[in-house]
Image (cartoon, rainbow, N blue to C red):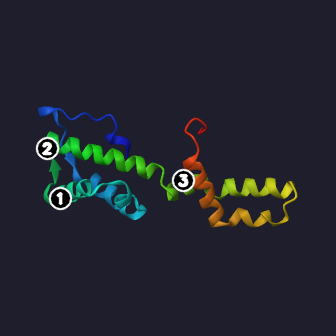
Amino acid sequence: MNLWRGAHVEGSNCIALGTAVLRKLRLKAIRSGVWFRVLRRIDRVLMDLTLRVCDEIRNSGLARALLAVVVRLEDALKYSVPRVMDEVDFKLARRISDIALRLGNASAWRWASDLSFVRFLAVMRINEPSVLRS
């Protein structure tokens, strides 16, 4: 959904934005818990009213305001725990478990299928400095 990045909205050159993408983004943000955590009330109201009233956004001021909200949502969704859990997956947990088993930790075999451990790895991934990310 990074279609919004780099988009420029200027005067009469405003591209008509459809609300279908906004609806999908809103639903995804609500389901992941980002909607209320990241957006201020005024931003949520702006998006909700736009989706209720408009089929297509033609006003450049409104489009600019919505673009800021969309970028904020996309950034938050990018680093949400469930999304990073999908990236980390159980493969990394299995590799760490295998290493711990080889080093002599007898109970490490449980880590490979432990959802809490995968969640822990996802949170660690989110919080690691961007310099270290591959």
Location of residue 59 with respect to 102 vertically, above or below: above
**Residue visible at 28% across and 43% down in the picture:** 68
Q: Give the quarter of the figure containing the C terminus.
A: top right
Mark 2: secondary structure: loop
What residue is drawn where x is 38% and y is 58%? 37
Decide: few, some or many residues near mark 1? Use Cα within 10 Å; few <14, some 14-19, many ≥20.
few
Q: Position of residue 113 (x, y in %)?
A: 69, 66
Instruction: State left or right for residue 1 relative to residue 10.
Output: right
Q: Quadrant of residue 59?
A: top left
Distance, label 3 to label 2, CA atoms, is: 35 Å
Q: Do tag 1 and tag 3 residues touch (Cβ < 8 Å)?
A: no
Q: Earlier in the sequence, mark 1 or mark 3?
A: 1
Q: Say whether marks 3 and 2 touch (CB < 8 Å).
A: no
Residue type at numbered disc 3: Val
Q: Which residue is mark 3?
A: 84
Q: Give the x, y percent position of residue 119.
A: 59, 60
Q: Secondary structure at mark 1?
A: helix
Say the numbered circle drawn on residue 49: 1
Q: Residue at x 62, y 59 (%)?
A: 120
**In which quadrant of the rendered view does residue 48 lie?**
bottom left
Kindly state the secondary structure of the residue where label 3 is placed. helix
Q: CA distance from mark 1 to mark 3?
A: 31 Å
Classify 10 Å Cα crowding around label 2: few (below 14), some (14-19), many (20 and above).
some
**Residue at 29% over, 55% down:** 40
Eye-nearest disc, 2 or 1: 1
> Disc 3 or disc 2, which is closer to the eye?
3
Task: Look at mark 2 in the image and give the residue it sits on.
Answer: 58
Label 3: few (<14), some or many (≥20) within 10 Å?
many
Earlier-in-chain disc, 2 versus 1? 1
Q: Which residue type carries mark 1? A: Leu
In the displayed structure, would residue 132 be above or below residue 22? above
The tag earlier along the polypeptide, 3 or 2, is: 2
